[in-house]
Amino acid sequence: MSVHSQRHDPALTLGMAAIVRLAYEGGDLEGLLGRLVARIEQDPADAAALMDLYTLLQTTGQKEQALSVQAMALGLRRIYHRPHGRGDGLKILAFVAAGDFMTNTPIDLLLEGTDLDLWLVFVDAETTVLKDLPDHDVAFLAIGETAENMPILANIETLLAHWPAPVVNGAPKAIAALTRNEVCTLFEDEPTIYAPKTVRVGRETLASFIKGDLALRSVLPDADFPLIIRPVGTHAGQGLEKLEDVSAMADYLARHNDPDLYLAPFVDYRGADGLFRKQRIAFIDGQAFPSHFAVSEDWMVHYLSAKMTEFAERRAEEEAWMRDFDIDFAARHAEAFAALHRRLGLDYFGIDCAEMPDGRLLLFEADVAMIVHALDPDSTFPYKKPAMRKLFDAFADAMVRRAA
């Protein structure tokens, strides 16, 4: 759907994929903003325009304003339509929760290039009945694991009981179990995977350790400095730091007011060349698909900050990883991948991982809401589109198979 040709239907949105792509491609975001504001001024009940404005504000880093606008949209309606391509394919009903881009599975991005017809239904912990829903062939539980989403996931367990259509990822308890401190316990006895022990601790506990009233290993068994610390409920490196000693921990607590934090041992996973490599992989019905591969001098590897656009040799490494994934990386870690699918118990999820020197898969995180996209420019990343097309086609095919 063109960002210029949307009709003013209160349910019909441009959606995340179209708006984020406009931003990636350097499109006229100001023009889009003007058109959306004009629509809202003309009709304050234009919920679709409000929802697209939320997406635009979120895309441009204005999170608090975005969430405020989203709340206005949801006050008007809770069902939104986002047809892809011709929109004459399988009809998918995705259950989502209010929040930022990392709150739900980015299903709109996963459906890019298809003709599937997507409907988003917003639910919350107070939703008692799901009614007046559009006809659909398959449902998809897109709500991810966050502290805010826990009561929603508990509620939707009841709402989805005896659902008349197939439900993909219809395991709310399995999604709720994707907390950092729970995922590591799932793989404690898995020889092919190293998921560093992660504990959730209150700042008062850490303050007692700093004062010498507690031993570190009473907080995090078998651990020593350096440690990794981050606030509970954060993603994308927000608040994530490496602590070298007790004074660094005291300094961290002085700068962060979060009541609950995750603590884990630091794992030095750099290669022989001194660089850190982190892979993002999506799993669809147990099959692994490469999403991205980042190389960085920094242990905190994020694709956008890894300078992949600046180093041709790093892009060449990612290209080779994507091209040879099935016969190389996936083959080496076949047992680990099977264990991930078996123990997480989900139809769709993603992981961030690396390789240990001893050959084990180093698991940083497992989540259903990781951003997976094909937005990088072909001029710089010509190898990405074929790999992502394969992933997206597999996702669409999985929806079709489940609906059959």
Image (spheres, grey):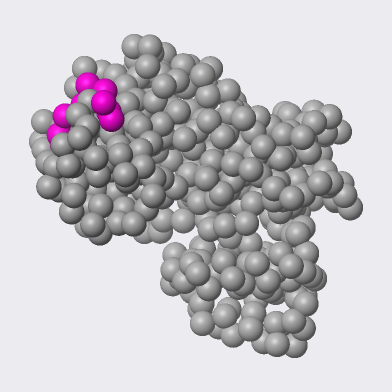
Q: Specify the principal SS of the magenta part.
A: loop
Q: In the figure, residue 208 lies in which quadrant?
A: top left
Residue 126 position in % (x across, y down): 74, 50
Residue 21 position in % (x across, y down): 51, 63
Q: Is residue 225 left or right of residue 4?
A: left
Image position of 336 with respect to 13: above or below? above
Residue 338 position in % (x across, y down): 48, 17
Q: Is residue 154 left or right of residue 66?
A: right
Q: Is residue 178 left or right of residue 1?
A: left
| Residue 66 appears in the rendering | yes
Residue 153 position in % (x across, y down): 65, 39
How many marks do you count on the picture?
A: 0
Tell me what residue is drawn at x 59 percent, y 46 percent.
149
Tell me what residue is drawn at x 75 percent, y 88 percent.
42
Instruction: Tell which residue pokes out farthest to the right in this image.
Output: 132
| Residue 331 appears in the rendering | no
- Determine if the magenta segment contains residue 227: no
**Looking at the rendering, in which quadrant would you find the N terminus?**
bottom right
Tell me what residue is drawn at x 67 percent, y 87 percent.
38
Q: In the figure, residue 404 lies in which quadrant?
A: top right
Q: Is residue 167 left or right of residue 210?
A: right
Q: 126 and 360: which one is in front?
A: 126
Image position of 237 with respect to 397: above or below? below
Q: 45 and 88: which one is in front?
A: 45
Q: Which residues are magenta?
A: 218-226
